[in-house]
Amino acid sequence: MPSPAVTLPGACGAPGLLALVTGASAGDVRLGGLTFRRPSSRPHGPHEPQGPRQPHESQGAYGAAEPVEAAEHTDSDRLLDRYVLSFAPAVAERVRDDVAALPPGVVLVTGTDPGRLALPHDAITVNPDDDLPALPEDDGPRHIRVLVDLSDPALTAPGWSPQAERLLRLHERMFLVVRHYAARCESLLVTLVGGITDTGVALPFTGLFTGFVKSLALELPAVPIVATLHTETDAASALDAGAAELANRRLLPVVAHVGGRRLTLRALAEPARPTEPPVARESLVVAAGGARGIGAALLTALAERYGPRIVVLGSTRLDVYDPELLDIDPDQAAATRPAYIKGLITGPGRIGVAEANAAFDRLQEARTVRRTLRELERHCGAGRVAYLHCDLRDREAVGRATDAIAAEHGRIDLLVNVAGTNRASAVGTKSRTDFLAVRDLKLRTYLNLKSALAGAPPRRWCNFGSFVGFTGQHGETDYGSANDFLNSSSAWAAARGETEFTIGWTLWRDIGLGATPIMKAFLAKAGQFTATPTEEGVAHFLAELGHPAPPAMTVLFGEKERAAITAAVPEYLDWCAHPPQFLDKVVRGPGELTASRTFDLDRDGYLRMHVVNGYPTLPGTFVPELAAEAAKALVPHRLPVVFEDVRLESFLRVYRNGRPQTKKIHAQLVSENAEESVVQVRILGDVHGPGGRILAKDRLHFSATVRMRDGYRTAPSWQAWDDTGATPVADPYHAPASAALLTEVFVSTDGTRLHPRGRRARLALDAEGVRRWFPDLLVPSVLLDGLARVAVLDLVDGRWTPVAIPRSIRRIEVFGPDNDAVLLGRRVELYSVPEHLDLEDAAADNLCVAVAANGDVLLEIEGTTGQVLGYVDQETGAFLCRDEFARRQR
């Protein structure tokens, strides 16, 4: 049976919770995208996720405004952490049998012309323009395909149009078909053609379908289910690519294909960093919903601290009640329910008990709204708080309300979109009425507000979403659809420079469903779910509002959820910390794996910034990163700490646009014990002739041995050098004539100089370039590249500096998880010893170290050998190749 309707923007689905706490369910219970087992001991993942996690910060005061009271609730005290959601690269790994894109007996739900597809003769086609055809009741299992074409410009932005209305009917048809076949669905593929841009931004309406799929995948865990987003606009090609995903391992059942990259949704821990007051006293705050529940608590917090002008839009009628009746506190009035109902069910105008109960509930809601408004006005001042009755699902009503607000108050400074309702039930039993009621309250409210405010958009727009929009939830195909729509819409708006964001709330402990006695008992008993304390929820809300540029999609969850996620999907949080940049597909064997990675100049534009002999070339110092990612995929519970015997046999180049290079990365477990796992990694590539014919297979580019351990060795200390006697020299790799020309993100050092003890420089990372190209590496590879170049610094004949390429490195060790992105803005000194070294001496003993401001060594490189390509004139920047320079020396 569907649960009663509740207005809980952060709700995570009551039925599964209640079933678990009361013992009514014999099997697993799924909550927030996770499956929880009944045994009392909670399973733990094999390891805690590793990666660069920045320390939490205290909220402090908001500029010149008075300090936020909730700021005293410091991050160290908080139960919930803030995670930013975005798409990130994910490896494709086949783990199931292939399923055809359009198998026999397929049911195709689409708004496109199916005549362009190779449909089997027994296919059933459902479109949004006709009535739902009669679906057979006993025709056996079925494969369901949903093909959505979002290439129409009218579907690019969130707004009303005939195409948008048709898309909503298509979404409804999808639900009805899935409901009909829920017990005998063989596979479900939702393909969103043109659903994501080539920059990786999903179109707003995609969230309707991805949110549905996330929840459905939890309800039908044995069924291959996935939603795929494509830049591709050819339906047949997108369907084929989507069908391949049905056989792949998935972190979440949503995969995007963007320019040869395979992406999925990532949650990265990132505390909010508020720098300004959320609002000022003269700001205009408009809340769509929010007179009750968590919205009321958060509006009251804004009012108490900043006293802005506030207008609340709500569906509760206040004008139908005697004002004196509304002035009774709802908590005190709760005891009068029996008497009130008795008065309605007796006498000449009597009504039924259910109707009388509903009437009392409506009165209590009105009292709660009135109490909220009084409290807001107490803080903001007389005449500064208004309430407008408005059915937020009604486009014209919303338009009239926003017109009235504009006429009275002007432009909105902050819009808080709170509206939402929840009626959880399994998709096979969910009514169409409930599905549309839950989906449409959030969806239509949002679209109506967008339409009404198009001419004067709010300066800031905050949507109240849910954890369910991130992971899905058993019984919440409608609620998941609506909340993920808010996510994708916010991401789209933010990509266009608008300040719009969605906060994914969990249950609140003291307000709404989380405050009921049975729910409190459940939360205490389960020990796996975090209920948000009111003061902490307020702190998170104010911090997000105080952020100068809030990320479009955030979600809040805590240690209990992290443990549960690790138990359910052990690799997910680790992947979130470091999604692999250099693995596309993986095939596993006993103790080994083979990955592939395609390099091209669109996807790997940074190669244009590292040019050797005229060709874009992968830096040799990126080999440890490739090796680390492959070794981590093979031994996920350990960390890549030491790299030995790194050999650089041949360049990895991309010669021109349209000529991608696909390479093979092979990792083999050589040995393993309690202290470490040793993995041998080789990077291979075929050699092709001018016509594309393979001239040689699996030519070795690079190889390395990776020592995977449970932790990092304590960093040694390095004594800083006195700079007396240092001689500045320009980095020869940045001279335009150099045979190895490094630009943009690879201009990573300054203060390069010779020193009586050796050579030194300072790390100077290009923040924009690192964030664009290398935000998530396991190894600080740009740092490694800059450090290796320091070893080359020299002066020959007082003016010539060699340009060399690395050929081998005996050993590299890293002493912590910090990558280039984490090191941005930090002071890091680079040193190379000894004073005189010959890079072409295979037996040379040399050392390079990167040192933090406190003297701790971040990483070290031992025993580097190289090949000198030529020399750059420090005075003119001219380059001479090795042979020409040698002739001049004679």
Image (cartoon, grey):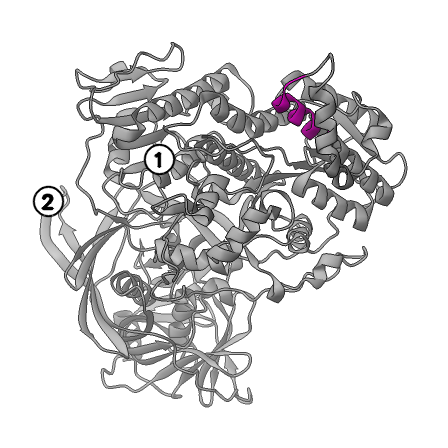
Q: Quadrant of the N terminus?
A: top left
97 and 537: which is toward the camera: 537
Whether residue 807 is visible here, answered yes or no, is yes
Q: What's the magenta region?
A: 351-363
Q: Is 528 drawn above or below residue 440 in the view shown?
A: below
Residue at (58, 58) in percent of width and height: 271
Dot 2: element: loop
Q: Please state which amino acid type lies under the numbered disc 1.
A: Ala
Dot 1: element: strand
- Residue 480 is situated, as x and y percent measured from the top left of the image, at 47, 36
Q: CA distance from mark 2 to mark 1?
A: 37 Å
Which label sits on residue 227? 1
| Label 1 CA crowd tier, 10 Å (few <14, some 14–19, many 20+) | many
Q: Is 522 drawn above or below residue 143 in the view shown?
A: below
Which label sits on residue 161? none
Would you say residue 232 sits in the magenta stretch? Answer: no
Magenta stretch, overall SS = helix
Q: In the shown orientation, is residue 504 left or right of residue 598?
A: right
| Label 2 CA crowd tier, 10 Å (few <14, some 14–19, many 20+) | few
- Residue 457 is situated, as x and y percent measured from the top left of the image, at 68, 31
Residue lying farthest front?
347
Residue at (55, 42) in percent of width and height: 11
Whether residue 609 is visible here, answered yes or no, is no
Q: In the shown orientation, is residue 172 left or right of residue 889?
A: right
Residue at (25, 29) in percent of width and height: 184
Which label sits on residue 693? 2
Q: In the shown orientation, is residue 427 left or right of residue 393?
A: left
Q: In the shown orientation, is residue 404 left or right of residue 156?
A: right
Decide which of tag 2 and tag 1 comes sooner along the chain: 1
